Amino acid sequence: MAAVTTPPPTTTTTVRRTRRRPSFGRVVAWTVMGAIMLITLLPFYWILRTALSTNAGISADPASPLPVDPTSGGFARALGLQSTKEAIAQGGAGGGLDFWRYLLNSVIVSTLITGCQMLFSAMAAYAFARLRWRGRDKVFALFLGGLMVPTIFTLLPNFVLIKQLGLIDSLLGIALPTMFMTPFAVFFLRQFFMNIPREVEEAALLDGAGKVRIFFRVLLPMAATPVITLSVLTYITSWNDYFWPLMVSYSDSSRVLTVALAIFRAQSPQTGIDWSGLMAATLIAALPMLALFAFFARRIVSSISFTGIK
């Protein structure tokens, strides 16, 4: 008869995790970060608070941290959902805002600039990074000199050019100056193309592919992440542009949303500016770009660090 041996009783040891006491530097860092976040988000909250208030309430209690006489009338005026009588009764000008038309104009201009700029900038970046030709580095250094030229210096020459082309007061006239390429976009994509191993391109050459096919079939798909990152940044920049569209658009057919907000502010009644409607329209115009940036924030940070831009 085999002896049955019972296993020795197991002793359970309780592992206690000792909490590390936060250091003074960590506390200071989190405090500073919280203060920066508060300062950054406070204007957006104040815009929302003003948009949900009535104009009479804003005048009566301008320092209230909460909406005064909460109402959605400001959003209704911004979207053109109020009649003239109702708008005037709530402190608006009654002129209205063709919001959806201006929104469509902004989408068309931003999409046109972003799509064309990504294509031509990627082609120029490929030429500077991969193709060998005389004076390439000197031309690239001269091209980067455009980064040191303030944008305001180019407004008048661009305006004269657009006027001579007969594109004043048109969506194409707004998009044309930045539609082809920018020095920053070319530099950004060139940094990525230079980090791609040359063996990839050499293998494609051995398979009989030409330079154009290698660019569109091999390198451009590999550059999807930086291209998307640059597309988001370009789209946000073109969406928020104000001064140049103001110079070349004179009618509703070519007026973008940023210029339309200034026109809406100018339609002030005798009682004062329609702050509620203006802040509501501003918030609606900013929400698509905030959502776009929040969605691609992680990819933007990783792409910038990968391309070597510090």
Image (tube, rainbow, N blue to C red):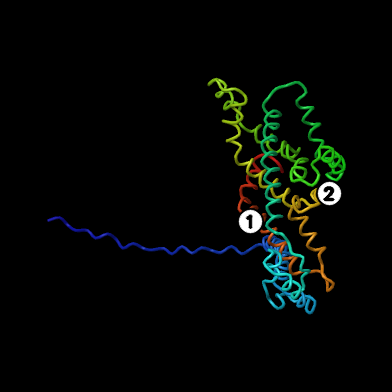
Q: Is residue 11 left or right of residue 44?
A: left
Q: Position of residue 208 (x, y in %)?
A: 55, 20
Which three-letter amino acid code belongs to the residue tagged 2? Met
Q: Position of residue 69 (x, y in %)?
A: 70, 78
Please state, as top left, top right, bottom left or bottom right, where the N terminus lies in the image: bottom left
Which of marks 1 and 2 precedes in the sequence? 2
Please give the name of the residue rendered at 73% of the width and 73% of the height, measured from the top-left corner.
85
Q: Which residue is mark 1?
A: 291
Distance between the alpha carbons at the discs numbered 2 and 1: 29 Å
Which three-letter amino acid code belongs to the residue tagged 1? Ala
In this view, the residue in front, 163 or 177, is: 163
Cβ–Cβ under 8 Å for marks 2 and 1:
no
Numbered disc 1: secondary structure: helix
Q: How many marks?
A: 2
Which mark is drawn over residue 302? none
Q: Is residue 246 left or right of residue 116?
A: right
Q: Is residue 51 above or below residue 105?
A: below
Extreme-left residue of the structure: 1
Please give the name of the residue rendered at 81% of the width and 69% of the height, measured from the top-left corner.
273
Numbered disc 2: secondary structure: helix
Please state, as top left, top right, bottom left or bottom right, where the C terminus lies in the image: top right
Please give the name of the residue rendered at 73% of the width and 66% of the height, measured from the top-left corner.
47
Q: Is residue 276 above or below residue 186?
A: below
Residue 22 placement: quadrant: bottom right
- Mark 1 crowd level (few <14, some 14–19, many ≥20, 10 Å Cα): few
Q: Position of residue 159 (x, y in %)?
A: 85, 42
Which mark is drawn over residue 247? 2
Foreground: disc 2 or disc 1? 2
Please give the name of the residue rendered at 82% of the width and 67% of the height, measured from the top-left corner.
268
Q: Is residue 88 above or below residue 307?
A: below
